[in-house]
Amino acid sequence: MISQEVSIADIINKQRAYFNTGKTKDINFRLEQLKTLKQAVTQQKDAIINALKADLNKPEFESYATEIGVIQEISYAIKHIKTWAKPQKAPVSPQFFPASARIYPEPLGVVLIISPWNYPFSLIISPLVGAIAAGNCAILKPSELTPNTSRLLNEMIKQYFDPAYITVVEGGVQTSQQLLAEKFDHIFFTGGTAVGKIVMEAAAKNLTPVTLELGGKSPCIVGSDINIEHTARRITWGKFLNCGQTCIAPDYLLVNKSIKENFLNELQKCLQEFYGDNPARSSDYGRIVSKKHFERLAHFLKEGKVRIGGETNPSELYIAPTVLEDVSLTDSVMEEEIFGPILPVIEYTDITEAIDLINSKSKPLALYLFSNNKNLQQQVLQQTSSGGVCINDTVIQVAVSSLPFGGVGDSGIGKYHGKSSFDTFSHYKSVLHNPFWLDLKWRYAPYKDKLSTLKRLIG
């Protein structure tokens, strides 16, 4: 843990000195560092699983799928980095002949990556992939709410990387404040909207650009023309994965009135199939990260009517997978991002009702639609705004490296994954080259008799 502000400044100065050597700009160096990162994750699999189990009671399968699975993102960058880093030719208008133009991606410098507690390993490694690929030095700040994973990340990065290149700074709010007081070349933050505003305010004092991966209330529309069994299974998985503590989890359901009862009955069957008669005893069901978050979620259970679940155990930070009915739009469960295993269900009769409700709220990070109706799909796509959309499934869009991931409005600024991660941590430098072999005089003074030529060129 870093307790002295001067220590953080010293770390940054050492990283700036390392960056200024030019070593990180070499593509082969970046490629080797990505391979080292992949090796680190591969060799530390057991330790990662154990840390996540200790912090979140995360099942081993979920640890592989959602945390260790970041290996795929590393592999994607290794495969494409040489293409991404190549200067790109840009077209030049004929009036500038014989000039040519290229766009050169170059690293920003020293970047800060602040990660959340819900996916405490993958959500720090994934942006790091982009920072390395683009040629930056990086300081990583893991969440103090998942101390075992934070400690593991610290040890792992120390073992595999020079601290002047990549280092971990552990600590709580005070450490974050000390980091944010410093000048970075980019800050990448994943977390809640409230803290995102604090990060952006601090960054503004140094004119530091930011990427904010936030969240919000991601709606899930369930139409009448669906495969009910598949829909219920996919929503159950996406909502209760990681005990509901996923920024892109379906936050609330908007279900067509004509199928609501059949759908909720199927949802209950899925929950029983996934977690048994008593999810508290299931090895496949996680726990809430802290007492504070448990108490926040327990308050939501007092609103509406519990249709499924509702059981809690404060000593184990356990909240059963829960479905709520009869909630009011003014209830806190419908005003705040839930970020837990509680799913409010609201019925609608016409799709315009669902769209109007979604548009009355802040723009979400994700929007889910279950429907086979192509016209309805297009209507929802055209009449709503969200960071991303997934049709007839949940959550898996985040695993597609070719899709930029990020929010809009209150759900975030900027995007990453795949090429987008490289772009986020790069500056695209425009370079114009004009040779000496031709030098037309139409643009030079004196301007007498040249205006007509200029008018023709401009049109």
Image (cartoon, rainbow, N blue to C red):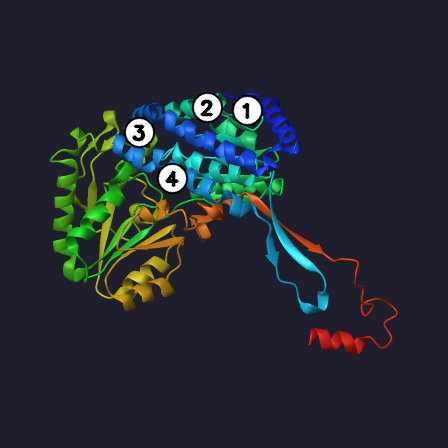
Alpha carbon distance from label 4 to label 2? 22 Å
Q: Which residue is mark 2?
A: 154
Residue at coordinates 41% horizontally, 53% vertically from top-left?
Answer: 387
Of 458 and 370, nearer the camera is 458
Say which label, 1 or 2, has the lower sequence index: 2
- Circle number at residue 72: 4
Sequence-earlier tag: 4 or 1: 4
Quarter occupied by residue 6: top right
Residue 171, horizontal then vertical, whole percent: 47, 25
Amino acid type, label 1 = Asp
Q: Residue flagged by tag 4: what amino acid is it?
A: Gln
The amino acid type, in three-letter code, at marker 2 is Asn
Vertical relation: 132 (above or below) 102: above
Left or right? Give the position of 345 relative to 278: right
Q: Are marks 4 and 2 in contact (CB under 8 Å)?
A: no
Whether 327 is drawn above or below 350: the answer is above
Q: CA distance from mark 1 to mark 2?
A: 12 Å
Q: Which residue is mark 1?
A: 162
Question: How far from the left and from the top, in percent, is residue 309?
Answer: 16, 40
- Give the quadrant of residue 371: bottom left
**Across the whole image, how many numbered discs are drawn on residues?**
4
Nearest to the observer: residue 294 or residue 2 = 2
Do callouts 3 and 4 mark residues in contact (Cβ within 8 Å)?
no
Mark 3 falls on what kind of element? helix
The label number, if any, that marks residue 413 in the structure image: none
* Mark 4 Cα shell of 10 Å, populated few (<14), some (14-19), many (≥20): some
State the residue position of label 3. Answer: 56
Residue 411 appearing in the image? yes
The alpha-carbon separation of the residues under discs 4 and 1 comes to: 24 Å
Mark 1 and mark 3 lie on one chain; the one further toward the N terminus is 3
Pointers 4 and 1 in contact (C-beta within 8 Å): no
Residue at (44% x, 23% y) in the render: 156
